[in-house]
Image (cartoon, rainbow, N blue to C red):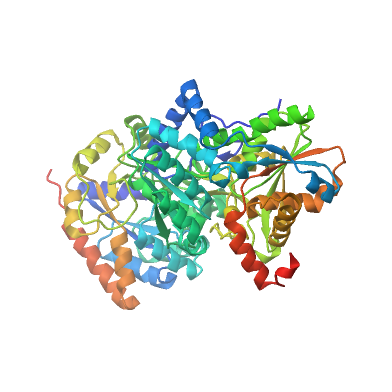
């Protein structure tokens, strides 16, 4: 059982839904990311997703694009982020998932990454532009280092492919709530509940829903039919809008706590 | 016999493939299926051939450039005159094929990226012809540099989006077009302008550009009674080069040389020589050679010609480089400018700065060929679009007296 599996097992025992929180590493700088992440974890995040900045993040909306640009302007590298993960692991128990685009991993070396990431305690990876067909080697090496390759499913995924992806994913299945890029949306996509139900009925792993969820109210709605709720841009935006690190830490902390409280308890 | 074909999953050896977000997988599968089906349809090819003939002006001439041959003092040089095709470049071959396919797939809208604006103008043209709404993504820097092409696209009825993310150039325009496609995937056709991107684009765009090589083969056999010794073409994404090369790949005595933009020189970091100076990587949905820093962040490319200004290259070129079937060389900004001036003066043909890179290679290396060798250069586009820029460069350097 992986660390992510244990988290979901514990949540299930308590009839709770997972809060997966996202931050871009190195925005505004790595030291701040460590403070922000620690706060988010202590205020209710069950899994922490750390974004690796990339020059051409084609699945991201403006909020995360800008955060990536700021982080890259500071010179953040994958090596730095692995070091950040190690430090973070000393402060929190929360499983850490790295989210990034394929080329920085490829450039670092697939085998080398799996070894280093395993050593510093990375629990999972999400690589939006690396479908399992192309990522066999990378994902196998990650698994061998006890890192869960978390795959994505979208509203356009066919039923046959859904079977394939739910067999290949580990930890959880990431359901992309809409056709589009990341970023806050005023309303949830229509029919989301039924789509998630379809995915959950097929999946051996918990299904977490992300993209466009930015308020406690939306998180609450989604938590009624998902195993986990992923919130990204809304955290990143709070960091961007804060005047200094202390303010950002307070802001993301209270938001994490507000989100976690909004998630419905399942009735048995 | 040597072949260059992708496997069923769009891999040319280790290159190519489909490195895209999950939302696009279904769209690419649909595209792949539809393309495989129309590929076998004679109705589709007849309709496309009709358009290429009556609308785009094909076949384009294969012209013996006697003056240039004399000047170079090497081989007999032929120019494949893609500059004479409608909209002034080979780009029209691809957009007519893809927009016909989009019509067949009943897509309501077409989006595209453009660098300097040549592909944008071509797709806006095809969309005007077919009556399909068209939106073109163009980096904000390119919008400023190529204001006239923006106006051309608007005249043709297209909407141009100025892209302000990232480096504000072609690669960012592609990112933004992909983001649009992810959002509107069910109704929208994404018309990629070169032999790049996720499968099936590299194969499909190549198939639409193969007409260049097929015509050239017929023409040279009629004119010379034999195949050429060497083919030359500039390489940015690589569609004009692969279009010329592909029908000749199995004829192993025909050398193929792609000329990349050397910019201000490899050492300067200001270049677009992806195959010469890049390394394998994953970018824009494909595995191919890319220009990136040591952390895998994509580096901006640079070239005096905006059409070659791309930090990736079509995966089939990466494959042909690795297996040695094609050779890739460079021409610098200055060499391309000189070739631009030389061809204008000696042949009365103003080439696109992109195509001038291929001519530049001959000016440098032409003497190494035998006198009875036959070389075909793909003159992929005309230079009208570049005259203002060239004038400015000459004015800012040692003056126009240099011409």
Residue in the foreground of this view, choosing between A177 and A202:
A177
The tally of labels here is 0
Residue A235 showing in the rendered view: yes
Q: Seen from this angle, which residue lies furthest left?
A: A267
Say left or right for A45 vs B111. Answer: left
Q: Seen from this angle, which residue lies furthest front?
A: B348
Q: Pinpoint residue B305: horizontal percent, then vertical percent.
A: 61, 57
Q: Pinpoint residue B187: horizontal percent, then vertical percent.
A: 32, 40
Quarter of the figure with residue B238: top right
Residue B372, compared with residue A248, is above or below; it is above
Residue B309 showing in the rendered view: no
Q: Pinpoint residue B358: horizontal percent, then vertical percent.
A: 71, 49
Say left or right for B123 vs B72. Answer: left
Q: In which quarter of the image is the N terminus of chain B?
A: top right
Q: Quadrant of the C terminus of chain B?
A: bottom right
Residue B77, compared with residue B254, is above or below; it is below
Q: Pinpoint residue A178: horizontal percent, then vertical percent.
A: 28, 46
Determine the residue positioned at 64% across, 30% down: B214
Determine the residue positioned at 87% across, 41% down: B370
Determine the residue positioned at 55% across, 50% down: A106
Residue in the foreground of this view, choosing between A68 and A259:
A68
Residue B249, compared with residue A20, is above or below; it is above
């Amino acid at each position: 059982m992986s660390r992510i599996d244990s988290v979901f097992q514990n949540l299930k025992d308590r009839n709770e839904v997972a809060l997966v929180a996202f931050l871009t590493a190195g925005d505004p700088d790595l030291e701040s990311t460590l403070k922000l992440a620690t706060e988010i974890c202590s205020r209710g995040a069950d899994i922490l997703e750390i974004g690796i900045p990339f020059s051409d993040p084609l699945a991201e909306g403006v909020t995360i694009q800008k955060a990536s640009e700021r982080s890259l302007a500071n010179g953040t590298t994958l090596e730095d982020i692995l070091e950040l993960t190690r430090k973070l692991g000393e402060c929190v128990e929360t499983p850490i998932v790295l989210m990034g685009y394929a080329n920085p991993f490829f450039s670092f070396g697939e085998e080398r990454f799996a070894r280093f990431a395993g050593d510093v305690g990375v629990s999972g990876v999400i690589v939006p532009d690396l479908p399992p067909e192309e990522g066999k080697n990378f994902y196998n090496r990650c698994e061998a280092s006890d890192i869960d390759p978390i795959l994505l499913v979208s509203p356009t995924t066919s039923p046959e492919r859904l079977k394939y992806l739910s067999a290949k994913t580990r930890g959880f299945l990431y359901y992309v709530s809409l056709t589009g890029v990341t970023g806050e949306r005023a309303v949830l996509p229509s029919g989301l509940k039924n789509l998630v139900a379809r995915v959950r009925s097929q999946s051996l792993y918990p299904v977490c829903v992300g993209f466009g969820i930015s308020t406690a109210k939306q998180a609450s709605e989604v938590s009624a039919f998902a195993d986990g709720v992923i919130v990204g841009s809304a955290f990143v935006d709070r960091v961007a809008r804060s005047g200094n690190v202390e303010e950002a830490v307070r802001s993301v902390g209270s938001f994490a706590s507000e989100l976690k409280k909004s998630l419905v308890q399942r009735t048995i | 016999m040597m072949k260059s074909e992708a496997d069923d999953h769009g891999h040319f050896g280790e290159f190519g493939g489909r490195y895209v977000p999950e939302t696009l997988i279904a769209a690419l599968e649909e595209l792949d299926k539809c393309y495989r089906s129309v590929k076998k349809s004679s109705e589709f090819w007849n309709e496309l051939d009709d358009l290429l003939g009556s609308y785009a002006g094909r076949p384009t001439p294969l012209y013996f450039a006697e003056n240039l041959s004399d000047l170079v003092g090497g081989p007999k040089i032929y120019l494949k005159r893609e500059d004479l095709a409608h909209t002034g470049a080979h780009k029209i071959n691809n957009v007519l094929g893809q927009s016909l396919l989009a019509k067949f797939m009943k897509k309501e809208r077409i989006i595209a990226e453009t660098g300097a604006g040549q592909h944008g103008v071509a797709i806006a043209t095809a969309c005007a012809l077919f009556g399909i709404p068209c939106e073109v993504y163009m980096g904000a820097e390119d919008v400023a540099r190529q204001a006239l092409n923006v106006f051309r696209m608007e005249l043709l009825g297209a909407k141009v989006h100025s892209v302000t993310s990232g480096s504000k150039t072609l690669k960012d325009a592609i990112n933004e077009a992909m983001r649009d496609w992810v959002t509107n995937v069910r109704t929208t056709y994404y018309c990629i302008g070169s032999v790049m991107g996720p499968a099936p684009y590299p194969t499909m765009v190549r198939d639409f550009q193969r007409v260049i090589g097929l015509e050239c083969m017929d023409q040279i056999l009629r004119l010379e009674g034999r195949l050429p010794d060497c083919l030359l073409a500039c390489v940015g994404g690589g569609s004009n080069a692969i279009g010329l090369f592909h029908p000749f790949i199995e004829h192993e005595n025909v050398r193929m040389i792609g000329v990349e933009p050397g910019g201000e020189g490899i050492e300067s970091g200001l270049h677009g020589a992806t195959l010469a100076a890049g390394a394998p990587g994953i970018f824009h949905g494909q595995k191919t050679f890319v220009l990136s820093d040591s952390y895998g962040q994509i580096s901006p490319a640079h070239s005096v010609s905006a059409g070659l200004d791309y930090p990736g290259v079509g995966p089939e070129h990466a494959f042909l480089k690795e297996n040695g079937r094609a050779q890739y060389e460079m021409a610098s900004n200055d060499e391309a400018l000189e070739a631009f001036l030389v061809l204008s003066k000696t042949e009365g043909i103003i080439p696109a700065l992109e195509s001038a890179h291929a001519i530049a290679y001959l000016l440098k290396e032409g003497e190494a060929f035998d006198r009875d060798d036959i070389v075909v250069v793909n003159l992929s586009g005309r230079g009208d679009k570049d005259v203002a820029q060239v004038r400015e460069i000459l004015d800012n350097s040692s003056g126009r007296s240099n011409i």
